[in-house]
Amino acid sequence: MVGKDEDELTRLMRAAIAGNERAYGEVLHRAAGLVCGYVRRRTMQGGIDPEDVVQETLLAIHLSATPGGAIRPSRPGSTRLRVTS
């Protein structure tokens, strides 16, 4: 994901951190699609269930968005989310 899509995800993430529930849902939806696709491409026969990785990633995003935590896009690698607290 690059360019316009990355900018949109960054905007949504900032809005989610600011408390916008619709943006938060959209971040989770988009993150799920990105992570699932990434894991499926990388683990064709590895015995790893992509849905497990997706759930762990969404949980990390959710926990980081609670008070005291923050999620920030990692640029320029848009497939990476940097979780800081």
Image (cartoon, rainbow, N blue to C red):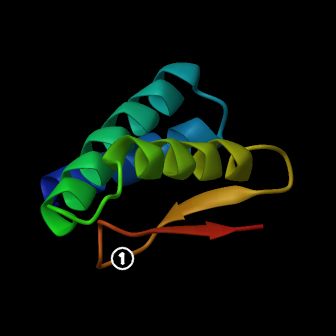
Viewed as shown, does residue 84 lie left or right of 16?
right
Viewed as shown, does residue 58 lie left or right of 29?
right
State whether residue 2 appears in this view: no
Residue visible at 58% across and 27% down in the picture: 20
Viewed as shown, does residue 61 lie left or right of 3?
right
Residue visible at 26% across and 41% down in the picture: 33
- How many marks can you see? 1
How packed mark 1 is, by other alpha carbons closer than 10 Å (few <14, some 14-19, many 20 or more), is: few
Q: Secondary structure at mark 1?
A: loop
Dividing the picture into quarters, in which one does residue 40 lie? bottom left
Position in image of residue 60 (x %, y %):
62, 52
Position in image of residue 56 (x %, y %):
55, 50
The foreground one among 57 and 42 is: 42
State whether residue 74 appears in this view: yes
Q: Is residue 44 above or below residue 74?
A: above
Looking at the rendered image, the quarter that the C terminus falls into is: bottom right
Q: Is residue 19 above or below residue 78?
A: above
The residue tagged 1 is 75
The foreground one among 35 and 42 is: 42
Looking at the rendered image, the quarter that the N terminus falls into is: bottom left
Three-letter amino acid code at disc 1?
Arg
In the picture as drawn, the residue positioned furthest to the bottom comes out as: 76
Position in image of residue 81 (x %, y %):
46, 65
Position in image of residue 55 (x %, y %):
50, 41
In the picture as drawn, the residue positioned furthest to the top comes out as: 22
Q: Is residue 73 above or below residue 54?
A: below
